[in-house]
Amino acid sequence: MAEITKSYEPREVEKKWYAAWLEAKAFAGKVELGKEAYSIVIPPPNVTGVLTMGHVLNNTIQDILIRRARLEGKSALWLPGTDHAGIATQTVVERELRKQKQTRHDYGREKFVEKVWAWREEKGGIILEQLRRLGASCDWDRTAFTMDPAYSERVLHVFVELFQRGHIYRGKRMVNWCPASLTALSDEEVIMKPVNGTMYRVRYRLNDPAGKSDTFIEVKTTRPETIPGDVAIAVHPDDPRFAALIGRTVRRPIGPAYDMLIIADPAVDKEFGTGALKITPAHDRTDYEIGLRHKLPVIDVLHPNGTINELGGPELAGMDRFAARKKAAEMLKEAGALVAEEPYANNVGYSERADVPIEPRLTQQWWLRYPKIEEAKQVVRDGQIKFYPERWSKVYLHWLENIQDWCISRQLWWGHRIPVWYRKGLDRETLTEADLQNPAIVHVSQTGPADPQNWDQEDDVLDTWASSWLWPFATLGWPDPTEMKKAGFDYFYPTSTLVTGPDIIFFWVARMIMAGLEFVRPGEPVERRIPFKNVYFTGIIRDQQGRKMSKSLGNSPDPLDLIDTYGADGLRFGIISIAPQGQDIRFQEDRIESGKNFCNKLWNACRFRQMNGEAGDNATLGGITARLERAKFDADDHAILDRLLTTTREVDRCFAEFEFSAAVQALYGFFWNDFCDWYVEVSKSKLQSPDTKANCLAIQDLVLRQMLLLLHPFIPFITEELWQLLGYGASGRFIEETPLENASQLATASSGGGLMLDHAQVAAVENIKAFVSKARALKADHNLASRRDVTFFIITGDREWALLAANLAKITRMAGAAGLERRETVEGAPATVTTLGTLYLDLASTVDAGAEKIRLQKELDAITKHIAGTEARLANKAFTDKAPAAVLEGARKQLADQQAKRAELGRLLTALR
RNA sequence: GGACGCUUAGCUCAGUUGGUUAGAGCACGUGCUUCACACGCACGGGGUCACAGGUUCGAGUCCUGUAGCGUCCACCA
């Protein structure tokens, strides 16, 4: 057995074991029919991504679940991969090109896409390497990528299927246009931001056949640069202020001359602004709808990149929309049409990726009518899919209630090109619904037309989410039966648990559920079609100021640095300990440090065990329990094993309820306080005696072995190392190959040979602990160092003395005492009242009677207050009548104890006078 | 405008179904290099559980309201 070093050095240990695990293919997800399957698909990070604290949390949790599943004897699969992240990746590569003063158009579509692939080969997937550093036990041989040829085929297959099932259509509609990325976006990719802008109050002179009207109608707008696209003024039909004006016209004040009709439409809010609304159908959703109702023309004054086009008039043409806004305001002023401008805060939709305001824009796009909406609601409502925390199901359901068709086309080059071909020379703008169904004009298939020379493929690609929504089954070979068999589809689908952030509940979670229900195992019960059974939503990691950690803010520490400083296990333990279920996490590096400290503590406890020598068969649980000598069990032995069972049970419960931070806290508390601070310390006297040594070591082995197993999912590296060093496993076997005993199995195992754990001993030990604490405090109060040269005296009853005498060696050791002697009387020594008698410090000559009095009086005051409270409760008839017997009994006992203590304190004080 | 979450020690947070004197980590103070660990040990100080009502024998915990912070959804030009 290699000797354990003084402190834990993670670096080499992590490297060594990760390599060993990979070498042995320990993470391979295998179909093992005798075993229960447990599977997780990773939320695929962007192929451009680097590891963030969010990933650390998310993937640590997945690894915990997977490793625990292995320990529970399940066949576990954690399927990794990356997402091609259309806009993000294309942007990254275009940025590289821009450095060389080039654009994607210099290369053309095919060459550019090649460039992206080359970039991906060289720099993509860094994040997967980083996950290995974290210890992620993914089945790397299955690593998937949404642009892989096989995966791509599945994406196109789904498009064709949905088209044939009538869920996909093409249409000219208002979309969210990103002028930076030059593509349409789905509603989910638009985030609303409050913006401080200006509200312009503009007046329009009414046209008068006589040519001398001095009547005006006023509107308010934040976007004067779109006025050249105005085609009408709308008022509410019931608004008496404007009733007389409906049907008249006004002259557009700037831009090409145009007479706009004043129309009535109920969409206008009478209360807002002036009550009159300028209608710019090309640049506003509401205006567009009003325009449709009134058959108004659509005048688009913007280029796709957000500059004004020639329809905006010569003064504005070519200007950026924001510059044009100022210019338009000036022009209005000159024309006498600007009545007022005032600061105005409103919400503006921004492109999530490019962080620029989006433009509503009328374009031809491909749309999806979501399939299986009702069923998707049902499976969550009925609990076939369970959300943790449960409250997210409400958010999910609300979104599904109000769901809109999904714009799935993107005007990008990097992505799955939509498998639609148009007959050469066809005008795509004017295609009708019927044309789309006509195979002579439009071809829709996975493989394309037989005579490609006569066709042009659709230029658009699919939204990235329109590929990743298939992730749980497309990564398992679906729909190809051979591939599915190879991947173990039947065995691993539906997956067990999805671990993700609530921020992608709409983007991804909801859509995967609908996709699974639509495509997998049609006709079978929902339990077989859903993509996962549980969804665990992590919290969002925030910085000290409560801001979301993000790359752009630069407020996220680099997890790799944290791994270097604290070890992967320290980072994992730390992050989990501050991540309660369902709450956002305020990141604190000192918690990561405390994770590292815990690892070191674990390391040293095992080191202590090792230094006490080998004691027999450690390689199996049976070997260890066979070494237990039941006849020699004392209170501490009973208590520590009882607490071990309690802790094991608590961790079981935590896993059942996805309460990982509670599990970590239970393990931390048990190991540090109960085991290290108490049991190991009391062991030190037992280990001196040949009579008690063997049993004590067997108990330590039992505890350490179980702790390593329980801790392994959280801190895999150090537990593997210690497991091997202490020889708990069969040689050549990893810790994960050892089945983890649950609490009752462990109880049965350790009770072989007639041992019954005595729960009452836990209380006895607590009693002794409290007594030792009192003794230590008495010493500390008199500024005595922890040297063992003090003698304590005690005045106590026979029963209490019996308990003390039985534990004398450990008490004196733990309290740092030369001895503890029973006396009938003690004079002039500092004292303290304990539940086991009045304890005196043998230092009479050095005692300051005044200070003693103050100290005792403080204690007396405190206990008197408590007694008053307890008495009041017991004096309350309602309490004694209605409280349960156990509570009542507890209160009475408490009162008796408190009174005894007060009497003793009073006596001590009197003696000092 | 709608929904949800949070408010407990200086800081970050636990606190299961209401029940003895509300806990942890960090920070702070004092003392300890005690033969596993100073990445440690011991002892200690520190909280009217946001506020106001209510239910109850009993409320940090349940109910109602208020305030502040945060998130999501919708959005009016």
Image (tube, rainbow, N blue to C red):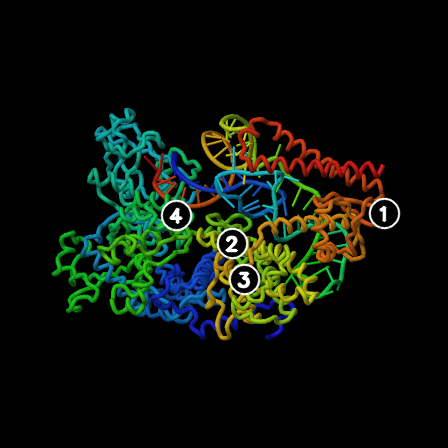
Point 58% across, 62% down: residue: A599
Secondary structure of the residue carrying numbered label 3: loop
Front: mark 3 or 2:
3
Q: Label 1 crowding class (10 Å Cα cut-off): few <14, some 14-19, many 20+?
A: some
Q: Gap between marks 3 and 2, in whole Å?
A: 31 Å
Chain where mark 2 sits? A
Q: Label 4 crowding class (10 Å Cα cut-off): few <14, some 14-19, many 20+?
A: some
Looking at the picture, tell me which residue is in the foreground, A396 or A818. A818
Location of mark 4 (residue): A191
Q: Are marks 2 and 4 on the same chain?
A: yes
Residue A394 falls in which quadrant of the image?
Answer: top left
The image position of residue A651, as x and y in percent, is: 50, 55
Chain where mark 1 sits? A
Give amino acid for label 4.
Ile
Front: mark 2 or 4:
2
- Between disc 3 and disc 2, whose residue precedes? 2
Q: Gap between marks 3 and 1, in whole Å?
A: 51 Å
Q: Is residue A316 visible?
A: no
* Labelled pair 2, 4 in contact (Cβ < 8 Å): no
Front: mark 3 or 1:
3
Q: Is residue A60 left or right of residue B76?
A: right
Location of mark 3 (residue): A753
Looking at the picture, tell me which residue is in the foreground, A668 or A831. A831
Location of mark 2 (residue): A663
Give amino acid for label 1.
Ala
Point 29% across, 58% down: residue: A462
